[in-house]
Image (spheres, rainbow, N blue to C red):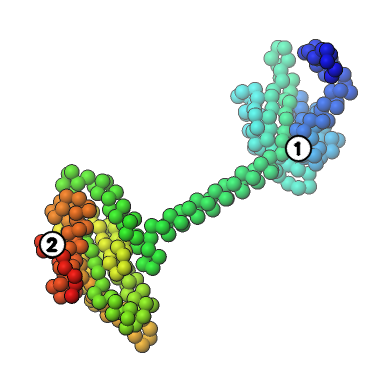
Amino acid sequence: MAYGDSVPGPKDFLTLLSDPEMLQLMLVACPDGIVATDADGTITLYAGASESIFQFDPYEVLGRDLEVLLATPEARRLLQAELDDDGHVANLELPGIRKGMGPFVAAFSAARINDRYGDPLGIVMYIRDHSNVRAIEDALRRNNAQLNHLVSKLDHLARHDQLTKLLNRGSAVEAAADAILATGLEDEVTFGVALFDIDHFKQVNDSHGHLAGDLVLTALGNVLRKAVRAGDIVGRFGGEEFVAFLPGATLEHTAAFAERVRSAIEDARVNVSDELTVQITVSAGVAAIPGCADSLHEALRIADDRLYAAKRAGRNRVQMDDDYERRNAA
């Protein structure tokens, strides 16, 4: 348009629409499928990208009910129900039917046309093939599911000891702190802490190799896992040390739990090979909140001191007294 030419106004546009050839060109060039029906649902217009979308020739569609383009009668009823409610729909996904290829996802934007007296004249629809859109959405959902699974797996790996499959030190302490908040120790609910250490673990590694040491660590982890109740927390504290946090347990209950674990380990036999069986023992120190300490950190320190007191006293025992002096184990 040259400078100074007037911009076409509404009347000019209506003039374009009144030109049959121009209207036909606009209908053919439309990138969406354009379908119109009369008041009875009979297709009277099949233009735009309709042939490309549905693969039906016009003579196979014109004069037939709209159901010829829909995969199920339910889709026809749903479209009609939406139009009855609002008079129009936008991007309503329905199962269309593609000639020789079966159903596909089609998005219908439609409006009901009435005459000046409010009587229905028919329906005008713009239709898009949403197969690719749905395929992309499905792929994104699959990718998101895989990503969520990967994140969950990485989080699990980051929180757990890979040998024993128990919580690692940081995660176990974090879970214990959360449990203390949940139980509400201001109501004087007790919380037990037990620390375990495998006696003479270095000798196992030196005498039988690290594979034997790994089997011993796994055996203790399995005993702890079987000994705890629902809601208890167990973890590998580092090296050959393990921890158990027991919400609701008094000092006496915690000591009894530790004694059951100690006894089970003493009675167990770790099969390293067909020719080699290893027997181990553990020492344990226990504490409880609020009986021994006012905080989780303090309870861990006391349990650790008592663990070393058990080592000094001869190993293979549970210590619950108040000897806090810490010395190197003999």
Q: Quadrant of residue 37?
A: top right
* Nearest the eye: 261 or 91: 261
Q: Quadrant of the N terminus?
A: top right
Q: Quadrant of residue 74?
A: top right
Count up the numbered dots. Answer: 2
Can residue 65 be seen here? The reply is no
| Disc on res. 324 | 2
| Disc on res. 68 | 1
Percent from the top left, x then y, of residue 272? 36, 81
Q: Residue at x 23, y 72 (%)?
A: 282
Give the mark nearest the N terminus, 1 or 2.
1
* Nearest the eye: 79 or 215: 215
Label 2 packing within 10 angstroms: few (<14), some (14-19), many (20+): some
* Nearest the eye: 171 or 102: 171
Q: In terms of secondary structure, where does tag 2 sit?
A: loop
Percent from the top left, x then y, of residue 221? 32, 68
* Nearest the eye: 147 or 260: 147
The correct choice, above or below, for 280 with respect to 23 in the image is: below
Label 1 packing within 10 angstroms: few (<14), some (14-19), many (20+): many
Q: Residue at x 43, y 55 (%)?
A: 155
Can residue 251 be seen here? The reply is yes
Q: Residue at x 28, y 65 (%)?
A: 242
The correct choice, above or below, for 172 with respect to 140 in the image is: below
Q: In terms of secondary structure, where does tag 1 sit?
A: helix
Q: Quadrant of the C terminus?
A: bottom left
Is 38 positioned to the left or the right of 25 in the image? Answer: left
Whole-angstrom CA distance, mark 1 to mark 2, is: 87 Å
The correct choice, above or below, for 276 with respect to 90 in the image is: below
Is 34 positioned to the left or the right of 59 in the image? Answer: left
| Disc on res. 282 | none
Please, what is the three-letter code of the amino acid marked with disc 2?
Answer: Tyr
